[in-house]
Structure formats: C-alpha cells, structure tokens
Image: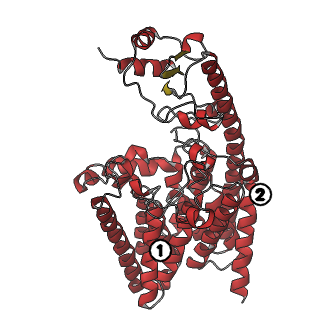
Amino acid sequence: MRAGNDKLSVFLTVFAALNIVFAFYVFSFFWGNHDWDWVKGTAQVLSLETGMFEGRYAKFILNVALFGGQVLPVLNTVVAFTLSAAGSTLLISYWQIERKPAKVVIALLPVLSPFVLGWLYFPINILGNFAAVVLVTGGLIWGEKSGIGYKIGAVICFLSALGIYPSVLEMMIVCFCFRHILNPDSGKGGLCRQAVLILTSLILFKLLLLFLTNAGFIYGGHYNMQTAAFADIVRRLPETAVLAVGQLRLPVPFVSLSYKLCALLLIVLSSGICLRRIEALLLWLIAFGATVASAALTAVPDEVAFMPRVNFYGLNFFYTGAAAVLLRQQKQWRNIGLLLSVLCLFLSVKQDLYAQKVWHFGKRAEEQLAERISLRIEQRGAYYPLIPVVAGELPLRPRYYQEVYAKPTPYVLNAPFLVRHIPAGMFNFYAPRDYFAKQAQISEPASALLNFLQYASRPWPAEAGIYVDDTYAVILLTSEGIGAIKAQLPK
C-alpha cells in the first residue's frame, strides 16, 4: 500500500512540476515550423498514415484516438505531460529506487532536462514521443516477469515505441543496463533473458520495416530509413567514439556548458564507484555506447548527431542513471549525488524557461516578418495563388539567444519558422485565403524573372528583395540564398 502511495505521490509531483515549468508553453500554444497546416486542422489533420512514409507507424495513434487528429491547446500538452510523468514514475519502479527523496529527484531529472525541448518544439509529436517512454519502461518491467504473456506484451511495447521513434532503442539499452548496475543481485540469467528480449524486438522491428517498405507504405530513401552497412558502422567507430565523448562536453543551444559539466561530474563519480565490478563497468560502457546508437546505425549520422530529441532518449537517461547510482550509495556519496542532481535540475529549469522566452520572441518576430513580406506582395497587385520561392532562410530566434554553444541544433534554435522548402505554410496560415501554392520551385521562368535573378544582389528588406509576377513571388532573404538560387539558373 505504501509503495502504491509513493508512486502516486511521485507521479503527481512530476506532473505538477512539468505544468509549472512549462506553463507559458502550455498556455501560449506554441508550435514549430512544420506544424502550420497540422495545427490549423482544416484541410489537413493527423492520421494513422501521417508518419508511415518514414517508418513511424505508431507515431500518431494517440493523436487520432484522443483528438481525431487535431492538435488542441492545453489538452494536447497536459495529456502528453501525464504520459511523461507516468513513464518517469515507472522508471523508478523498474530501477527499484527505494528512498523517497531519490525517487522524486530521479523521476524529475529526465522530464525537466533541456533535451525535452527537442520534442516540445513540435506539439504534433509530444503525445506519441512521451508515450514511448511509458512503453519502454512498461516493456522493461513486463520483460522481467515470468510467463509468456508478459514477454509477448513486452515485445509489443518495444515494437510500438520503436514505431513512434526508432531512437528509443537508446533508452531501452541505457535503462536496461542501469537496472543491472543498480541491482547486481538480479542474476545473470535474468540479465541474459532480458537482453535477448530486447534484441528480438529490434530484429522484429527491422523485419517489420522491411515488410512495410516492400508493401509500398514506407519510402526507403528517407534519411530516417537509411541504415548504414555493417562495414560502414565498423569504419566509423573512431568518429563515433569521438562523438560519444564530445556529446558529454560540447554545449548545444539550451544545453549549457554548466549543465553538461554538472552531469559529467555525476557520471565520473558514479562510474568510479563501480570500478571494482567488471560486470558493472561493461554495462556502463554498453550504456554509454548506446547514447550514440542512432548516429552509429544510420547512413547519415550528421542528421542525428547532437540532436536534442535523440539525446532525450539516450544521453538524458544516461545522466539519470548516473544520478541514481550515487543516490543508492552510503550517506556521504548519497548527499553528493543529491546536491549534484538538484543542481542539474536547477540548471534544467533555467534553460527550459529561457527557451520559452526565446521561442516566443523569435516566433513573433518571424510572424511579423511574414506579414510585412505579404503586405509588399499584395501591393504589387498580383493574381493568386502565386508560387513562393524563398532564397535563403532567416531564423530570428538566435537574435534573442545570448549563450555560447559549440554545435548548432536543428529546430530547437536554428531552424526558421519560415522554411525555404515549404514557405506556403506560414504565409497561408495568416491569410484570409491561400495566396501561395504548395510548390516552391521555379520551373518555367519568364525572361523578366530570369533577368531579375541574374542581377539580384540585395536581400530583404531592400525594395529589390522581392519579385512578383502573375506566377511567382520570389523573396530574397539572405545573400547566401541569392547565391544558391543563381547557381540553379540555366547556363
């Protein structure tokens, strides 16, 4: 009875903390640069097939089942936070954390970390991707129970989580390793059986993707679907090792150097405690390697390296596991672990609040930019719909971000809301009717347009930064964009 009360207490604490820290995000109804049509929910709503083309067959099940594919203010986020709090509560149960202060701290660390910002940027994603945490932790708990029914249930949980976002494999491995680092008495037999269960799920996932690809449901050429050949994985081992070490020390937007140094100290101290146990050290190395599994296995590692939404499943839970090890020690080490964990939480909340401010200012600035551009196009008296062609991208959030970082991250800071390859989304969102077509390329330019592009040199807000005829609206946002669009002109 007491254990049940503790779980409920931890869940309510985590849920309350999420809603307090991200209150501005919840009530301002923020969304990201790919969400214009989905949030509008008129001509386009989320469906079971929406993420299928890139292999994410389970991504939008909850969106469809709960909200009919709509993205709703407040309710969408509150349900997602419920799932996040539930997954974190299940994690402390799986790791068998006993002390109440340790339970609360460990449950809070992964859900408030700045890595969560990688998912919050896209509200269409948070229901599925926070549910993936519940599926992984639930599957790991079921996998330890005797009985074939529990084993099948665990595999279904893992396959569902992988179908939401394949990088959950990092969380599966990291949490599994720390389960046996924290509880060495669980036995080698149980460890091996669970490892086989996870491996079986990964093999079944790969076979399922192969079947869906051959059936024509999945586009195999998408970067998410391109797995590196074994020879490439082996060849890239040195650079993968450099990436693994680099992610521990190199700051990225909203994941500050102070946060990473604090978390690194947690790792150094907690791993040092395990030096005398060879089995524990091996599990540490496997868990550490798993934090870059997504980048190691994909054919295009640059797409996922240092990406917060990927680190959310790997590095995030690696930090949490390191804190759990310290909080399981004797009083002196436990107090040090508690101090460092609380400091990590403070730095996390600071970055979470900072991100909400920067996102708000940046989004509003880009919306006003789009309004000014639209007004100038309307003043040209063109016929609609026009084909918008944007030269370059002008993300304005970095103007409000003052901290230093070593690696840029897509979406969290550096991606614009006015996206070059899908500009109609933002423009049409605020227009009384669709002024711009979905396509965004020049196919048959008139001589006047070719002449304009040939001699174009000054980007927005110069008067010559916009060209409009009866077919195209060409918007020159940056000098680099002008150079790129000139390079595509026929010679």
The first of marks 2 and 1 along the sequence is 2
Residue 101 visible in the current orientation: no
Residue drawn 47% across the image and 84% down it: 144
- For this view, does 248 lie left or right of residue 285? right
User: Which mark, residue 181?
Assistant: none
- For this view, does 434 lie left or right of residue 173? right
Residue drawn 53% across the image and 73% down it: 137
Identify the image quadrant of residue 36: top right
- For mark 2, does the 10 Å Cα neighbourhood hold few (<14), some (14 to 19), or many (20 or more) residues? few
- Residue type at numbered disc 2: Ile
The number of numbered discs placed on residues in the rendered structure image is: 2
Quadrant containing the N terminus in the rendered view: bottom right
Q: Residue 151, how many percent across, how many down?
A: 43, 84
Establish if 400 lies above or below 328: above
Q: Residue furthest front?
A: 383
Q: Residue 329, how many percent across, how many down?
A: 61, 74
Look at mark 2 in the image and give the residue it sits on.
20
Name the element at disc 2.
Answer: helix
User: Which mark, residue 157?
Assistant: 1
- For mark 1, does the 10 Å Cα neighbourhood hold few (<14), some (14 to 19), or many (20 or more) residues? many
Seen from the viewer's position, the closer of residues 10 and 71 is: 71
Residue 483 visible in the current orientation: yes
Seen from the viewer's position, the closer of residues 229 and 386 is: 386
Depth check, mark 2 against mark 1: the one in front is 1
Seen from the viewer's position, the closer of residues 358 and 122 is: 122
Establish if 311 lies above or below 427: below
Identify the image quadrant of residue 431: top right
Residue drawn 49% across the image and 31% down it: 420
- Residue type at numbered disc 1: Cys
Name the element at disc 1.
Answer: helix
What colouring does the structure picture have?
secondary structure
Q: Residue 309, how many percent across, how many down?
A: 53, 52
